[in-house]
Image: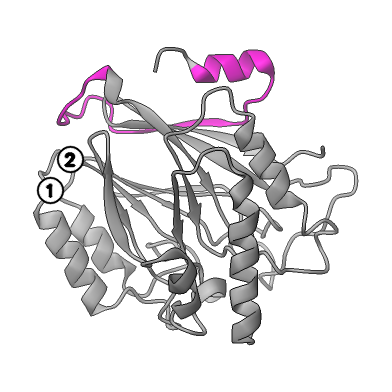
C-alpha cells in the first residue's frame, strides 16, 4: 500500500482496537511489499431478527455498510462469515430474508464480496436456499499469494464438516507448497471453544490437523458474536463481532443469551474488522464499532 492506513485512521479518530498476529520472520513465497492487501470481515447480520435486545434490528447492517463505504481506502474484498439471516422454519420466509440481505448489501461500494452460510441460514435445509442466491457453501480462491479456503460447518445440523468436505480440503492443500499462506474462513470455530453452547465443530480437529504442516495458517470465523483470539499450536483463530446482538463470554452465565441493550452506549458490542495481510506472514486486525448515525 502507498500509505499507512492505520496511521490515517488513528489521526482521523476512526480506528478501533488493533491486534497484530502472525509468524514474523517466516519465509513465504512472493514476499514483495506490493502483495500486501486488506479485507473487511463482517459477520452475523441476522436479517429477520426482531425484538430484544436490539431496538434497531433494521439499522445495524446499514450503519456498518456506511462505515465500510466511508473507508479512505477500499478493501480488496469483503467477507461475510455467516448467519446472514435469522433462522425461520418457513422456507419461503428464509428465501425472502436471504433476498432482503442481498438487496441491503447492494449498497456496498465494493462489489468483490465473499459469502458463506451460518447455521441460521442453512442448517434446516442443508443450505439449499443459500445456494440458490449465493452459490457454493465451500470453495477456494487466491489473492496476492494467499490461498483462501471457505469451509461449511453449518449445513450439517450436527455441526460437522463431513468426510466429503474434509477429503476435498485435503486434496486442495496437497496442491499447496508448505510455505503458502493459508487463510480459512468459516462460521463456527474449528476448535472446541465451548461445545455446551454449540461453539465448536465436531470434526474441526481434523481440519486443524490438515493445516498443521503449513507455517502460516490462520482462521477467521463468526458465530460467537464477539471478538476472540486463540491459538492451536501456531495456527491462530480470530472470531469477529456480530452485527445484531453481542453474546456473553463462554461459560460466563448459565445460558447463551444475548447481552442486554445498553441505552447509554447503543450498539455496544457490535462491529466489524479490517484484516491487513502484511509481510512477512503477519495479519493486523483493526476492530471498528457500529456507531449511532
Asked if the stretch drawn in magenta spans residue 100, the answer is no
Q: Which mark is residue 176?
A: 1
Can residue 11 be seen here? yes
Q: Which mark is residue 238?
A: none
Can residue 87 be seen here? no
Tell me if 139 is positioned left or right of 223 in this view: left
Res. 217 image quadrant = top left
- 283 above or below 186? above
Residue 226: image location, x then y, percent: 60, 52
Tell me if 209 is positioned left or right of 245 in this view: left
Tell me if 108 is positioned left or right of 148 in this view: right
The residue sitting at 40% across, 66% down in the picture is 135
The residue carrying pointer 2 sits among few (fewer than 14), some (14 to 19) or many (20 or more) residues within 10 Å by Cα, namely many
Bounds of the magenta segment? 5-33
The residue indicated by pointer 2 is 180
Q: Secondary structure at mark 1?
A: loop
- 162 above or below 174? below
Q: Quadrant of the N terminus?
A: top left
Residue 253: image location, x then y, percent: 69, 66
Amino acid at each position: 500500500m502507498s500509505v499507512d492506513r492505520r496511521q490515517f485512521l488513528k489521526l482521523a479518530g476512526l480506528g478501533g482496537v488493533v491486534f497484530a498476529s502472525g509468524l514474523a520472520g517466516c519465509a513465504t513465497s512472493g514476499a514483495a511489499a506490493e502483495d500486501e492487501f486488506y479485507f473487511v470481515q463482517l459477520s452475523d447480520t441476522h436479517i429477520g431478527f426482531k425484538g430484544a435486545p436490539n431496538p434497531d434490528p433494521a439499522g445495524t447492517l446499514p450503519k456498518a455498510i456506511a462505515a465500510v463505504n466511508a473507508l479512505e481506502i477500499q478493501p480488496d474484498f469483503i467477507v461475510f462469515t455467516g448467519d446472514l439471516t435469522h433462522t425461520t422454519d418457513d422456507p419461503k420466509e428464509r428465501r425472502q430474508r436471504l433476498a432482503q440481505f442481498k438487496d441491503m448489501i447492494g449498497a456496498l461500494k465494493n462489489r468483490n464480496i465473499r459469502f458463506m452460510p451460518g447455521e441460521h441460514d442453512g442448517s434446516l435445509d442443508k443450505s439449499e436456499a443459500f445456494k440458490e442466491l449465493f452459490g457454493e457453501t465451500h470453495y477456494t480462491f487466491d489473492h496476492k499469494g494467499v490461498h483462501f479456503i471457505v469451509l461449511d460447518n453449518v449445513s450439517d445440523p450436527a455441526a460437522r464438516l463431513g468426510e466429503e468436505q474434509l477429503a476435498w480440503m485435503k486434496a486442495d492443500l496437497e496442491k499447496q507448497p508448505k510455505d503458502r499462506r493459508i487463510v480459512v474462513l468459516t462460521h463456527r470455530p474449528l476448535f472446541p471453544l465451548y461445545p455446551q453452547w454449540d461453539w465448536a465443530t465436531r470434526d474441526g480437529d481434523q481440519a486443524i490437523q490438515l493445516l498443521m504442516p503449513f507455517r502460516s495458517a490462520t482462521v477467521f470465523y463468526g458465530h460467537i458474536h464477539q471478538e476472540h483470539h486463540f491459538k492451536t499450536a501456531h495456527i491462530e483463530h480470530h472470531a469477529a463481532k456480530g452485527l445484531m446482538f453481542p453474546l456473553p463470554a463462554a461459560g460466563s452465565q448459565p445460558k447463551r443469551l444475548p447481552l442486554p441493550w445498553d441505552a447509554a452506549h447503543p450498539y455496544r458490542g457490535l462491529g466489524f474488522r479490517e484484516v491487513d495481510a502484511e509481510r512477512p506472514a503477519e495479519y493486523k486486525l483493526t476492530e471498528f464499532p457500529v456507531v449511532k448515525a
